[in-house]
Image (tube, grey):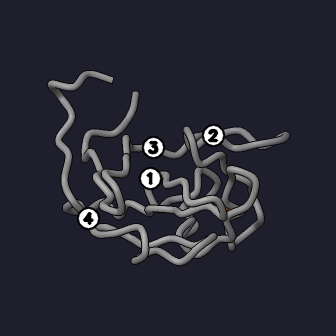
């Protein structure tokens, strides 16, 4: 990550996101799903499953992953990679907490 290319924006508080759920943020045409785990970690992925563009924001968060609601692919929250025998990767975005406030970078990783 390069601090000079990151473009942090405040998108709300962690309490705005349901535990083990997600909330979407629009960036132009792109929808970014911001996930909250059971232990209050946050992650950001493009809201498109690498299988067939399913809405990952509507999936269930578990064990550092989200299960796509369409065909149950399991996607790692940290980098968007498909787990198990499935192959593919969704874009991930840098995200961090400043106290309760969520800061999202609109510059995708990789
Ligand atoms: S679109 Fe996500 S598993 Fe098929």
- Name which of mark 4 and mark 2 comes first in the sequence: 4
Where, quadrant-wise, is the N terminus in this rendering? top left
Q: Secondary structure at mark 4?
A: strand
Q: Residue at x 45, y 43 (%)?
A: 92
Q: Is residue 28 left or right of residue 57?
A: left
Q: CA distance from mark 1 to mark 3?
A: 9 Å
Density class for disc 2 (Cα within 10 Å; few <14, some 14-19, many ≥20) is: many
Residue designated by label 3? 91
Density class for disc 3 (Cα within 10 Å; few <14, some 14-19, many ≥20) is: some
- Name which of mark 4 and mark 1 comes first in the sequence: 4
> Can you give x and y, in whole percent of width and height, for residue 4 in the image?
15, 24
Q: CA distance from mark 2 to mark 1?
A: 13 Å
As drawn, the label of residue 81 is 2
Residue designated by label 4? 11
- The front one of 59 and 72 is 59
Q: CA distance from mark 4 to mark 3?
A: 18 Å
Q: Secondary structure at mark 3?
A: loop
Residue designated by label 1? 44
């Amino acid at each position: 990550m390069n601090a000079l290319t990151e473009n942090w924006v405040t998108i709300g508080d962690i309490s705005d996101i349901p535990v083990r759920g997600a909330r979407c943020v629009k960036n132009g045409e792109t929808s970014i799903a911001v996930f909250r785990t059971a232990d209050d970690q946050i992650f950001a992925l493009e809201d498109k499953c690498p299988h067939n563009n399913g809405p990952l924001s509507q999936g269930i968060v578990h064990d550092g992953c989200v299960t796509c609601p369409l065909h149950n692919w399991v996607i790692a929250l940290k980098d968007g990679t498909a787990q198990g025998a499935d192959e593919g990767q969704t874009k991930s975005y840098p995200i961090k907490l400043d106290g309760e406030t969520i800061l999202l970078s609109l510059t995708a990783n990789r």
